[in-house]
Image (cartoon, helix red, strand yellow):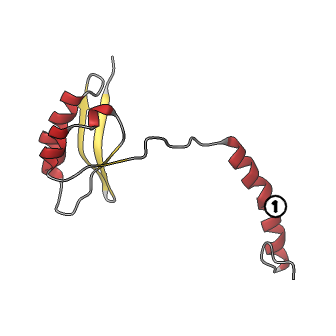
């Protein structure tokens, strides 16, 4: 069985939490927006959604009374090589910090 949890995220915490016992689809998302999310919004709130096809609903956007913004369609995954290259740079920064020089400063 699949359980889906959806909620709004604010600086103060979660708002409009909603749980259903099936995968998200457009009909469920429309009900969530109409009954939970839209009533919880305040003037000036911005709605940002991921690119799940169910979220691209004209009915939901109409219920929200504002345009929806969508995340980029491709988010670059974390790359271990980036972590490795960062860890190789750290010792140089630490060495320079101990000598009173700024990293990369050859004076």
Quarter of the N terminus within the rendering = top left
In the picture, measured across the screen, residue 102 lies left or right of residue 39, that is: right
The x and y percentages for residue 15 are 25, 49
In the picture, measured across the screen, residue 90 lies left or right of residue 20, that is: right
Q: Picture quarter containing residue 100?
A: bottom right
Residue at the farthest top position:
1
The x and y percentages for residue 43 are 16, 62
Residue under the point 16% across and 51% down: 40
Quarter of the C terminus within the rendering = bottom right
Residue under the point 84% across and 69% down: 95
Residue under the point 16% across and 48% down: 64
Q: Picture quarter containing residue 52?
A: top left
Q: Residues within 10 Å of mark 1 (few under 14, many from 20)?
A: few
**Secondary structure type for disc 1:** helix
**Residue 10 against residue 100 in the figure, above or below:** above
Q: Picture quarter containing residue 13?
A: bottom left
In front here: 81 or 10? 81
The x and y percentages for residue 14 are 30, 49
The x and y percentages for residue 41 are 18, 54
In the picture, measured across the screen, residue 96 lies left or right of residue 32, that is: right
Disc 1 designates what residue? 91
Residue at the farthest bottom position:
107
Tell me how many marks there are: 1
């Amino acid at each position: 069985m699949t359980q889906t949890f959806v909620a709004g995220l604010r600086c103060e915490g979660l708002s409009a939490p909603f749980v259903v016992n099936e995968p998200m689809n457009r009909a469920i998302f429309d009900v969530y927006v109409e009954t939970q999310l839209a009533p919880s919004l305040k003037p000036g709130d911005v709605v940002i959604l991921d690119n799940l096809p169910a979220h691209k609903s004209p009915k939901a956007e109409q219920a929200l009374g504002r345009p929806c913004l969508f995340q980029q369609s491709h988010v670059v995954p974390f790359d271990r090589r980036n972590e490795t290259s960062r860890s190789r740079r750290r010792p140089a920064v630490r060495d320079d910090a101990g000598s009173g020089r700024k990293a990369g400063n050859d004076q």
